[in-house]
Image: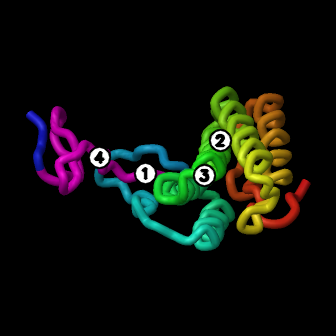
Amino acid sequence: MGSTGASSGGPAGTRDRDSAGRARNARPRDGLGRPLPYGTDGVARQPEGIVRTPSQTVTEAQELLDAGRPFHAHEVFEDAWKSGPGDERTLWRGLAQLAVGLTHAARGNATGGPRLLRRGAAAVEEWAAHSGRQQPYGLDVAGLASWARDLAGAVERDAEPVDAAARAPRLRGRQAS
């Protein structure tokens, strides 16, 4: 029998629900977004559905990436993707895919990480080509695509988890090699 109220976890067979009754996993998460056992101290989640300016989005996402929290950066990009103008959705979706790709690479997923990194690189490049904007909001589209492909190759070659903070991209400006 499922729970109808918000739940922080309980007996087997109950589902966590938000205040509107939608299923929501309330388990704590680690810095890479992996679920932890109920009652464990986890990393605070990013609030969902926040409308930020593009500049605020990029700044907040960069802070999260620098802190080794690409899963949380993906959630910030996802908010921009869902709330921003329709003609920018491909850009924000591509940036979210880059962050999720880094998340999977940090988790040691040598198949999914590279796939998402390349998909995100292609999306941001496609958006830049169609929009004619190579550095929207100061974003280094070419550098991000190059970073993503380089990291994808390294993850496939080494088949080892990467340090998310050490391998985080620079969203604005030139990428470190």
Which residue is tagged 3? Answer: 87
Which is nearer the eye, 174 or 127? 127
Distance of label 1 from label 4 (alpha carbons): 13 Å
Distance of label 3 from label 1 (alpha carbons): 33 Å
Q: Can you name the residue that lies furthest to the right here?
A: 177
Can you tell which of label 3 and label 1 is closer to the viewer?
A: 3
Residue 29 tag number: 1
The amino acid type found where label 2 is placed reads Gly
Can you tell which of label 3 and label 4 is closer to the viewer?
A: 3
Residue 24 tag number: 4
Where does the magenta region start and end? 5-30
Q: Earlier in the sequence, mark 2 or mark 1?
A: 1
Q: Earlier in the sequence, mark 1 or mark 4?
A: 4
Give the residue at x 82% y 34%.
153
The amino acid type found where label 4 is placed reads Arg
Element carrying mark 2: helix
Q: Residues within 10 Å of mark 1 (few under 14, many from 20)?
A: some
Give the residue at x 76% y 35%.
155
Distance of label 2 from label 1 (alpha carbons): 18 Å
Magenta-span inclusion, residue 24: yes
Q: How is the image coloured?
A: rainbow
The amino acid type found where label 3 is placed reads Asp
Magenta-span inclusion, residue 165: no
Which residue is tagged 2? Answer: 101
For residue 80, above or below residue 137:
above
The reply to whether dot 2 and dot 4 touch (C-beta < 8 Å) is no
Give the residue at x 62% y 39%.
104
Q: Earlier in the sequence, mark 3 or mark 4?
A: 4
Q: Position of residue 90 (x, y in %)?
A: 62, 46
The reply to whether dot 3 and dot 4 touch (C-beta < 8 Å) is no
Which is nearer the eye, 101 or 48? 48
